[in-house]
Protein backbone atom coordinates (compact mmCIF):
# COMPACT_ATOMS: atom_id res chain seq x y z
CA UNK A 1 0.00 0.00 0.00
CA UNK A 2 1.36 3.37 -0.94
CA UNK A 3 0.58 6.17 1.46
CA UNK A 4 2.02 9.29 3.04
CA UNK A 5 2.87 7.61 6.34
CA UNK A 6 6.45 8.93 6.40
CA UNK A 7 5.06 12.44 6.30
CA UNK A 8 2.78 11.62 9.24
CA UNK A 9 5.52 10.43 11.57
CA UNK A 10 8.33 12.84 10.70
CA UNK A 11 9.28 15.51 13.25
CA UNK A 12 6.77 14.70 16.00
CA UNK A 13 5.68 17.54 18.25
CA UNK A 14 8.04 17.37 21.23
CA UNK A 15 8.00 20.99 22.41
CA UNK A 16 6.25 21.64 25.70
CA UNK A 17 5.56 25.31 26.36
CA UNK A 18 3.91 25.38 29.78
CA UNK A 19 6.74 24.11 31.94
CA UNK A 20 7.24 26.73 34.72
CA UNK A 21 4.54 27.40 37.26
CA UNK A 22 3.91 31.08 38.00
CA UNK A 23 5.71 32.44 41.05
CA UNK A 24 3.72 33.64 44.03
CA UNK A 25 3.26 37.42 44.00
CA UNK A 26 1.68 38.06 47.38
CA UNK A 27 1.18 40.83 48.54
CA UNK A 28 1.21 42.41 45.08
CA UNK A 29 -1.89 40.26 44.55
CA UNK A 30 -3.94 38.41 47.13
CA UNK A 31 -3.23 34.84 48.16
CA UNK A 32 -6.52 33.75 46.60
CA UNK A 33 -5.49 35.34 43.32
CA UNK A 34 -2.19 33.48 43.47
CA UNK A 35 -4.06 30.20 43.98
CA UNK A 36 -6.46 30.93 41.11
CA UNK A 37 -3.59 31.57 38.70
CA UNK A 38 -1.77 28.44 39.81
CA UNK A 39 -4.91 26.30 39.34
CA UNK A 40 -5.55 27.79 35.91
CA UNK A 41 -1.94 27.13 34.90
CA UNK A 42 -2.12 23.48 35.99
CA UNK A 43 -5.39 22.98 34.08
CA UNK A 44 -3.87 24.43 30.92
CA UNK A 45 -0.73 22.38 31.43
CA UNK A 46 -2.87 19.25 31.62
CA UNK A 47 -4.62 20.17 28.37
CA UNK A 48 -1.31 20.72 26.61
CA UNK A 49 -0.06 17.34 27.82
CA UNK A 50 -3.27 15.62 26.69
CA UNK A 51 -3.03 17.28 23.29
CA UNK A 52 0.52 16.04 22.81
CA UNK A 53 -0.39 12.50 23.92
CA UNK A 54 -3.38 12.42 21.55
CA UNK A 55 -1.12 13.28 18.64
CA UNK A 56 1.45 10.70 19.70
CA UNK A 57 -1.08 7.91 20.09
CA UNK A 58 -2.82 8.76 16.81
CA UNK A 59 0.51 8.60 14.97
CA UNK A 60 1.20 5.20 16.54
CA UNK A 61 -2.29 4.00 15.61
CA UNK A 62 -2.02 5.12 11.98
CA UNK A 63 1.40 3.53 11.70
CA UNK A 64 -0.05 0.28 13.04
CA UNK A 65 -2.93 0.42 10.52
CA UNK A 66 -0.49 1.06 7.69
CA UNK A 67 1.81 -1.80 8.75
CA UNK A 68 -1.10 -4.21 9.22
CA UNK A 69 -2.48 -3.43 5.76
CA UNK A 70 0.95 -3.87 4.17
CA UNK A 71 1.47 -7.18 5.96
CA UNK A 72 -1.94 -8.55 4.94
CA UNK A 73 -1.49 -7.43 1.36
CA UNK A 74 1.93 -9.10 1.26
CA UNK A 75 0.47 -12.28 2.77
CA UNK A 76 -2.35 -12.56 0.22
CA UNK A 77 0.07 -11.75 -2.59
CA UNK A 78 2.36 -14.58 -1.45
CA UNK A 79 -0.63 -16.92 -1.18
CA UNK A 80 -1.71 -16.03 -4.70
CA UNK A 81 1.68 -17.04 -6.06
CA UNK A 82 1.83 -20.23 -3.98
CA UNK A 83 1.98 -23.56 -5.84
CA UNK A 84 -0.62 -25.03 -3.47
CA UNK A 85 -3.20 -22.51 -4.57
CA UNK A 86 -2.64 -23.22 -8.24
CA UNK A 87 -3.20 -26.93 -7.70
CA UNK A 88 -6.78 -26.46 -6.51
CA UNK A 89 -9.27 -24.26 -8.31
CA UNK A 90 -11.52 -23.69 -5.26
CA UNK A 91 -8.61 -22.64 -3.05
CA UNK A 92 -7.19 -20.47 -5.82
CA UNK A 93 -10.54 -18.70 -6.22
CA UNK A 94 -10.77 -18.11 -2.46
CA UNK A 95 -7.23 -16.69 -2.29
CA UNK A 96 -7.80 -14.47 -5.32
CA UNK A 97 -10.96 -13.10 -3.75
CA UNK A 98 -9.15 -12.57 -0.46
CA UNK A 99 -6.35 -10.72 -2.24
CA UNK A 100 -8.92 -8.55 -4.00
CA UNK A 101 -10.46 -7.69 -0.64
CA UNK A 102 -7.09 -6.72 0.85
CA UNK A 103 -6.40 -4.47 -2.14
CA UNK A 104 -9.70 -2.67 -1.56
CA UNK A 105 -9.00 -2.47 2.18
CA UNK A 106 -5.62 -0.92 1.47
CA UNK A 107 -7.29 1.85 -0.48
CA UNK A 108 -9.58 2.45 2.48
CA UNK A 109 -6.62 2.53 4.87
CA UNK A 110 -4.85 5.10 2.70
CA UNK A 111 -7.96 7.26 2.87
CA UNK A 112 -8.14 6.80 6.64
CA UNK A 113 -4.55 8.01 6.99
CA UNK A 114 -5.18 11.00 4.74
CA UNK A 115 -8.38 12.05 6.51
CA UNK A 116 -6.88 11.53 9.97
CA UNK A 117 -3.91 13.71 9.05
CA UNK A 118 -6.08 16.56 7.76
CA UNK A 119 -8.91 16.47 10.31
CA UNK A 120 -7.15 15.23 13.46
CA UNK A 121 -3.38 15.61 13.54
CA UNK A 122 -3.10 18.98 11.80
CA UNK A 123 -5.81 20.68 13.93
CA UNK A 124 -4.30 19.30 17.15
CA UNK A 125 -0.85 20.44 16.10
CA UNK A 126 -2.23 23.92 15.44
CA UNK A 127 -4.00 23.86 18.80
CA UNK A 128 -0.75 22.88 20.50
CA UNK A 129 1.00 25.86 18.96
CA UNK A 130 -1.39 28.19 20.77
CA UNK A 131 0.27 27.28 24.07
CA UNK A 132 3.35 29.13 22.87
CA UNK A 133 1.42 32.40 23.12
CA UNK A 134 0.16 31.51 26.60
CA UNK A 135 3.69 30.72 27.71
CA UNK A 136 4.93 34.07 26.36
CA UNK A 137 2.30 35.95 28.40
CA UNK A 138 3.21 33.99 31.52
CA UNK A 139 6.90 34.66 30.89
CA UNK A 140 6.24 38.41 30.74
CA UNK A 141 4.20 38.13 33.95
CA UNK A 142 7.05 36.24 35.60
CA UNK A 143 9.50 38.99 34.66
CA UNK A 144 7.23 41.54 36.34
CA UNK A 145 7.12 39.40 39.50
CA UNK A 146 10.90 39.02 39.59
CA UNK A 147 11.40 42.76 39.06
CA UNK A 148 8.93 43.47 41.87
CA UNK A 149 10.82 41.11 44.17
CA UNK A 150 14.13 42.77 43.29
CA UNK A 151 12.71 46.22 44.08
CA UNK A 152 11.22 44.92 47.33
CA UNK A 153 14.63 43.53 48.30
CA UNK A 154 16.28 46.89 47.66
CA UNK A 155 13.64 48.72 49.72
CA UNK A 156 14.10 46.28 52.59
CA UNK A 157 17.88 46.68 52.44
CA UNK A 158 17.69 50.48 52.53
CA UNK A 159 15.22 50.40 55.40
CA UNK A 160 17.41 48.03 57.42
CA UNK A 161 20.41 50.31 57.02
CA UNK A 162 18.64 53.06 58.93
CA UNK A 163 20.63 55.68 57.05
CA UNK A 164 18.99 59.09 57.40
CA UNK A 165 21.24 60.83 54.90
CA UNK A 166 19.24 62.95 52.38
CA UNK A 167 20.52 60.94 49.40
CA UNK A 168 19.54 57.67 51.06
CA UNK A 169 16.09 58.98 51.99
CA UNK A 170 15.52 60.17 48.40
CA UNK A 171 16.69 56.81 47.04
CA UNK A 172 14.43 54.95 49.46
CA UNK A 173 11.39 56.98 48.46
CA UNK A 174 12.18 56.41 44.79
CA UNK A 175 12.46 52.68 45.32
CA UNK A 176 9.18 52.66 47.25
CA UNK A 177 7.48 54.34 44.29
CA UNK A 178 9.09 51.78 41.99
CA UNK A 179 7.75 49.06 44.27
CA UNK A 180 4.23 50.46 44.05
CA UNK A 181 4.49 50.69 40.25
CA UNK A 182 5.83 47.13 40.04
CA UNK A 183 2.97 45.85 42.19
CA UNK A 184 0.42 47.67 40.02
CA UNK A 185 1.99 46.15 36.88
CA UNK A 186 1.69 42.67 38.41
CA UNK A 187 -1.92 43.27 39.40
CA UNK A 188 -2.77 44.50 35.89
CA UNK A 189 -1.00 41.56 34.27
CA UNK A 190 -2.70 39.10 36.61
CA UNK A 191 -6.12 40.57 35.86
CA UNK A 192 -5.53 40.31 32.11
CA UNK A 193 -4.42 36.68 32.39
CA UNK A 194 -7.43 35.75 34.51
CA UNK A 195 -9.75 37.36 31.96
CA UNK A 196 -8.24 35.88 28.78
CA UNK A 197 -6.86 32.46 29.74
CA UNK A 198 -10.19 31.05 31.04
CA UNK A 199 -11.74 31.88 27.66
CA UNK A 200 -9.11 29.71 25.96
CA UNK A 201 -9.72 27.00 28.56
CA UNK A 202 -13.50 27.01 28.04
CA UNK A 203 -13.22 26.95 24.23
CA UNK A 204 -11.11 23.78 24.22
CA UNK A 205 -14.20 21.56 23.87
CA UNK A 206 -15.57 23.60 20.97
CA UNK A 207 -12.25 23.12 19.17
CA UNK A 208 -11.62 19.46 19.96
CA UNK A 209 -15.14 18.08 19.48
CA UNK A 210 -15.31 18.49 15.65
CA UNK A 211 -11.86 16.93 15.41
CA UNK A 212 -12.94 13.87 17.38
CA UNK A 213 -16.18 13.61 15.40
CA UNK A 214 -14.21 13.65 12.14
CA UNK A 215 -11.98 10.87 13.48
CA UNK A 216 -15.02 8.77 14.46
CA UNK A 217 -16.52 9.21 10.99
CA UNK A 218 -13.24 8.21 9.36
CA UNK A 219 -13.13 5.11 11.57
CA UNK A 220 -16.72 4.29 10.69
CA UNK A 221 -15.99 4.51 6.97
CA UNK A 222 -12.83 2.43 7.24
CA UNK A 223 -14.16 -0.36 9.45
CA UNK A 224 -17.55 -0.33 7.74
CA UNK A 225 -15.91 -0.85 4.36
CA UNK A 226 -13.68 -3.56 5.83
CA UNK A 227 -16.72 -5.39 7.20
CA UNK A 228 -18.50 -5.10 3.85
CA UNK A 229 -15.49 -6.50 1.98
CA UNK A 230 -15.14 -9.53 4.22
CA UNK A 231 -18.90 -10.11 4.23
CA UNK A 232 -18.63 -10.56 0.46
CA UNK A 233 -16.07 -13.31 1.09
CA UNK A 234 -18.57 -15.24 3.23
CA UNK A 235 -21.95 -14.45 1.63
CA UNK A 236 -25.12 -16.00 2.99
CA UNK A 237 -26.98 -15.45 -0.27
CA UNK A 238 -25.89 -15.73 -3.89
CA UNK A 239 -22.18 -16.04 -4.45
CA UNK A 240 -20.17 -12.86 -4.78
CA UNK A 241 -19.05 -12.02 -8.29
CA UNK A 242 -15.94 -10.33 -9.65
CA UNK A 243 -16.21 -7.11 -11.61
CA UNK A 244 -14.35 -6.42 -14.82
CA UNK A 245 -11.58 -4.55 -13.02
CA UNK A 246 -10.84 -7.60 -10.86
CA UNK A 247 -12.35 -6.26 -7.64
CA UNK A 248 -15.04 -8.08 -5.75
CA UNK A 249 -18.47 -6.62 -6.15
CA UNK A 250 -21.89 -7.29 -4.74
CA UNK A 251 -23.95 -9.94 -6.56
CA UNK A 252 -26.18 -8.57 -9.25
CA UNK A 253 -29.35 -9.51 -7.45
CA UNK A 254 -32.33 -7.66 -6.21
CA UNK A 255 -32.00 -9.53 -2.90
CA UNK A 256 -29.53 -7.77 -0.62
CA UNK A 257 -27.03 -10.01 1.11
CA UNK A 258 -27.31 -10.37 4.86
CA UNK A 259 -24.21 -10.19 7.03
CA UNK A 260 -23.55 -13.52 8.81
CA UNK A 261 -23.46 -11.56 12.09
CA UNK A 262 -27.16 -10.80 11.60
CA UNK A 263 -28.26 -14.40 10.96
CA UNK A 264 -29.93 -16.59 13.57
CA UNK A 265 -27.36 -18.62 15.52
CA UNK A 266 -28.61 -21.96 14.18
CA UNK A 267 -28.42 -20.81 10.55
CA UNK A 268 -25.00 -19.26 11.09
CA UNK A 269 -23.63 -22.47 12.64
CA UNK A 270 -25.07 -24.46 9.72
CA UNK A 271 -23.20 -22.25 7.26
CA UNK A 272 -19.95 -22.60 9.23
CA UNK A 273 -20.26 -26.40 9.38
CA UNK A 274 -20.93 -26.50 5.64
CA UNK A 275 -17.82 -24.51 4.96
CA UNK A 276 -15.75 -26.73 7.25
CA UNK A 277 -17.03 -29.74 5.31
CA UNK A 278 -15.97 -28.11 2.04
CA UNK A 279 -12.51 -27.43 3.44
CA UNK A 280 -12.10 -31.02 4.67
CA UNK A 281 -13.08 -32.28 1.22
CA UNK A 282 -10.12 -30.50 -0.38
CA UNK A 283 -7.36 -32.78 -1.56
CA UNK A 284 -4.72 -30.84 0.38
CA UNK A 285 -6.46 -31.49 3.73
CA UNK A 286 -5.22 -34.70 5.35
CA UNK A 287 -7.95 -36.89 6.80
CA UNK A 288 -7.64 -37.36 10.55
Image (spheres, rainbow, N blue to C red):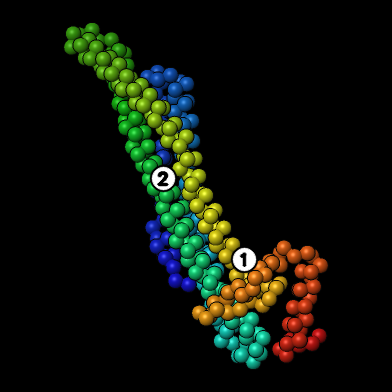
Identify the residue at horizontal 41%, vertical 37% (top origin). 20
Vertical relation: 243 (above or below) 27 = below
Q: Residue 272 at x, y = what percent?
A: 76, 73
Residue 81 point in image, percent of width and height: 56, 86
Image disc number at residue 127: 2
Above or below residue 44? Residue 86 is below
Q: Relative to 203, say whether 65 is above or below.
A: below
Packing grade of label 1 (10 A; few <14, some 14-19, many >=20) is few
Closer to the camera in the image, 140 or 78 = 78
Give x and y (percent) for residue 236: 71, 72
Checking the image for residue 227, the label placed there is 1
- Residue 163, horizontal then vertical, whole percent: 24, 10
Residue at image x 49%, y 61%? 112
Relative height, residue 219 to residue 282 (above, below): above
Furthest residue to the front?
254
Q: Is residue 162 left or right of residue 2?
A: left
Disc marking residue 279: none
The local secondary structure at tag 2 comes to helix
CA distance for labels 1 and 2: 34 Å
Amino acid sequence: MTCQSNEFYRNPLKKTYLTNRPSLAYPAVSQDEDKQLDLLFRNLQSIEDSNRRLQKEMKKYLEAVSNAEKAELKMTSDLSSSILCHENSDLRKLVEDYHSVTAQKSEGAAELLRVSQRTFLEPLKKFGGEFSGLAAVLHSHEQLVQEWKNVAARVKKLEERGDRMPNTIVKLEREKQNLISAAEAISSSHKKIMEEFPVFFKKRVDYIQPTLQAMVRAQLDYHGNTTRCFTILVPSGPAASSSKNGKLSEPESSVQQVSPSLLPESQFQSIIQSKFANIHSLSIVKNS
